[in-house]
Amino acid sequence: MDAGQGLSTSEVQSIRESLAAGRKPRVVFTASAGQIAGQVGQVIELTDPEVSDEFVVVRFGRDELPFSPADLAVAPKGVGRRVVEPKPEPEPEASPAVPAPEFVLDTPRVPAQRQEEPKVEQTEKPPARRAVKAVKPKGPAGLTVTLAYADGEWTVAAQQGSKALAKPYVVKPAEALKMVALVDVPGVQEAVEQILGTERAEAEQQAEKLRAELAEIEARLAELREAR
């Protein structure tokens, strides 16, 4: 029996079709299966190969364990079937001959020696039970929330994995400062406050400039009204 080759892709597909038809194909364990190499089992289920490489569930004795295709090979026809041998008919026992009576005076009885039964040592080791690997469930994709500053505007965006949940939208400087206050990282809040201070100073200078221009326009308007 050649149990060195694993299951090919076509053989796995053939097993999948047999299971769908209600049959349980027989397989032989290869050398990569360990101590149970050469033994025969039955495939009872194929799980998702993307979750685990050991997706071929085999019944071996009382155990149902998952294996990879490299651990198994298709069993040749006739392997694993038991042939019932006819039991020989017992021969009739001959009736024991009745011994003639002895006339012996004072013959001591000799006790029969007790024959010890030979001890049978069990040399075969039971097949090692392979531990079933626990499949770790996949968790949700990571969530990223980004607060950015560019061209005098604060924006917030949200993304989960490769999917954009919220495109960048503009928020007020006060809201940006509240968001940064939740992040207890030295230097981050100081940087935001410095940016806001620079914007505040520029806005005050622009407002002062506009006030001066407005004062000049109002003075000019007053002169034009007096010239009527």
Image: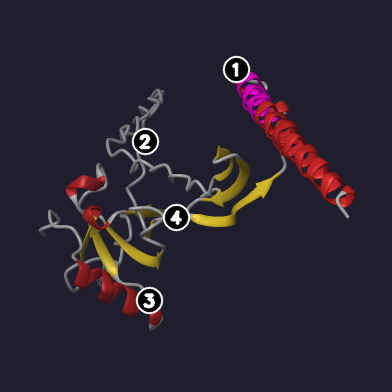
Residue to which mark 4 is pinned: 62
Residue plotted at (33% across, 43% down): 127
Q: Position of residue 126 (x, y in %)?
A: 34, 42
Of circles 2 and 1, the one toward us is: 1
Residue plotted at (65% across, 49% down): 170
Measure the alpha-carbon separation of dots 3 and 1: 64 Å
Q: Earlier in the sequence, mark 2 or mark 1?
A: 2
Q: Position of residue 178 (x, y in %)?
A: 75, 32
Amino acid, disc 3: Leu
Which type of secondary structure does the marked residue at label 1 adopt? Answer: loop
Q: Earlier in the sequence, mark 2 or mark 3?
A: 3
On the image, which quarter does residue 124 sit in? top left
Residue 120, numbered label = none
Q: Earlier in the sequence, mark 3 or mark 1?
A: 3
Between 191 and 60, the one lying in front of the other is 191
Magenta segment, which residues?
A: 189-200
Amino acid, disc 2: Phe
Task: Residue at the far top: name it.
Answer: 186
Residue to which mark 2 is pinned: 103
Of circles 1 and 4, the one toward us is: 1
Residue 187, numbered label = 1
